[in-house]
Image (cartoon, rainbow, N blue to C red):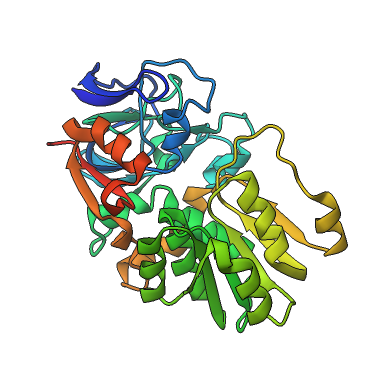
């Protein structure tokens, strides 16, 4: 079969890879129907992560079950499924509750980030612990919507929920990329009076304005937020970029006693955290890897009912064979690319 294989910094290739096989009784084989490129994948593309090459990338994928191990009880051949981008051992109490980031056996893993767990930017993938790593795609949820339920929609919701937004609050979302847009859509569920969204890309700012946010260019955001909040700052800030600079800005934008919720991925081992600022403002600071499975009961019905329309972020559709070029264009933000959907059949 074909897959997008990581060969080092800036080197992604679509090539023939071995078909996945069942290695344990609790696993399943899923034929991938749709997959996507995530901003987190760019950490590999940039060479930020110290991992060996030679594995299939991708943690956002959905498909159809083609084979199950003898220990799988919740799924059968032919089921349309969403696969969580993050999995654990699948057996401990935390994993069974969907909290795989707290796996008691310390087996939290992300698909397509190392040779340990090959990813889903391929024609098929092996899913360990299938009963707890997957959920069925219900009627009324498209494949495109389902792909977003594997990672970035739960991430946006996780950021909004942990921001503790109250009705009438003022919220700032830093970043208008795919995760930032999911955070905006989810923050609106909690009833804030207004949401400001900060970014530098004009097309992204125009989109979030259409979705109900007040767009702010990053160069003017400091002054604009001081004026809009009478110098008090926002009740809550959701950071969806992950850079050192934007995390610092999140702390600056929050009012005294406010909450900062970081879902942008930062891999710096030496983040210059302004502890004095956080201390004197009495801030609550939260971050963490999203517990995807735990949030499906909240999010799948919201998508199925039409209350959430996360698929608006997909504005670039290509075949898997063009995946390497899609990575380059996504990284360079060519042609206003926001989110890339890949078709494994093309």
Q: Which residue sits at x=33%, y=53%?
A: 338
Q: Which residue sits at x=33%, y=42%?
A: 330
**Residue 341 horizontal/vertical position (percent):** 25, 46
| Residue 120, above or below 317 | above
**Residue 71 horizontal/vertical position (percent):** 38, 30
Q: Which residue sits at x=36%, y=29%?
A: 57
| Residue 93, above or below 210 | above
Which residue reaches farthest left?
346
Q: Which residue sits at x=30%, y=29%?
A: 125
Task: Pick whichever, 151 or 326, lies toward us.
Answer: 326
**238 relative to 151 in the view: left or right:** right
Task: Pick whichever, 118 or 176, lies toward us.
Answer: 176
- Picture quadrant where residue 218 is located: bottom right
Please indicate, yes or no, whether residue 67 appears anywhere in the rendered image: no
**33 relative to 73 in the view: left or right:** left
**Residue 204 horizontal/vertical position (percent):** 38, 62
Task: Pick whichever, 81 or 69, lies toward us.
Answer: 81
**Residue 254 horizontal/vertical position (percent):** 71, 67
| Residue 334, above or below 197 | above
Considering the image in quadrants, where does the C terminus appear? top left
Considering the image in quadrants, where does the N terminus appear? top left
Please indicate, yes or no, whether residue 346 appears anywhere in the rendered image: yes
């Amino acid at each position: 079969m074909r897959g997008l294989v990581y060969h080092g910094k800036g080197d992604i290739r679509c090539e023939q890879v071995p078909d996945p096989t069942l290695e344990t009784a609790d696993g399943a084989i899923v034929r991938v129907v749709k997959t996507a490129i995530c901003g987190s994948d760019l950490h590999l593309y940039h060479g930020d992560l110290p991992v060996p090459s030679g594995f299939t990338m991708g943690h956002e994928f959905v498909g159809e079950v083609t084979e199950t191990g003898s220990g799988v009880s919740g799924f059968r051949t032919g089921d349309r499924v969403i696969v969580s981008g993050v999995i654990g051992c699948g057996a401990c109490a935390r994993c069974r509750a969907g909290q795989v980031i707290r796996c008691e056996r310390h087996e939290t893993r992300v698909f397509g980030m190392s040779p340990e767990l090959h990813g889903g930017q391929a024609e098929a993938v092996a899913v360990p612990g299938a009963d707890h790593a997957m959920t069925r795609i219900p009627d009324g949820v498209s494949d495109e919507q389902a792909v977003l339920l594997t990672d970035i929609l739960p991430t946006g919701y996780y950021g909004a929920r942990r921001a503790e937004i109250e009705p009438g609050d003022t919220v700032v979302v830093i970043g208008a990329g795919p995760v930032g847009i999911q955070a905006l859509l989810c923050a609106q569920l909690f009833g804030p009076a207004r949401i400001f969204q900060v970014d530098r890309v004009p097309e992204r700012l125009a989109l979030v304005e259409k979705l109900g946010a007040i767009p702010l260019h990053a160069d003017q955001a400091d002054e604009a937020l001081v004026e809009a909040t009478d110098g008090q700052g926002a009740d809550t800030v959701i950071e969806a970029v992950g850079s050192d600079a934007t995390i610092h800005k999140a702390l600056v934008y929050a009012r005294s006693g406010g909450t900062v919720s970081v879902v942008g991925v930062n891999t710096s081992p030496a983040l210059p955290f302004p502890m004095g600022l956080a201390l004197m403002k009495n801030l609550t600071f939260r971050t963490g890897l999203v517990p995807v499975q735990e949030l499906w009961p909240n999010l799948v019905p919201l998508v199925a009912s039409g209350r959430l329309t996360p698929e608006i972020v997909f504005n670039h559709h290509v075949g898997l064979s063009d995946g390497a070029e899609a990575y380059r264009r996504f990284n360079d933000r060519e042609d206003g690319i926001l989110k890339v959907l890949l078709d494994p059949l093309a």
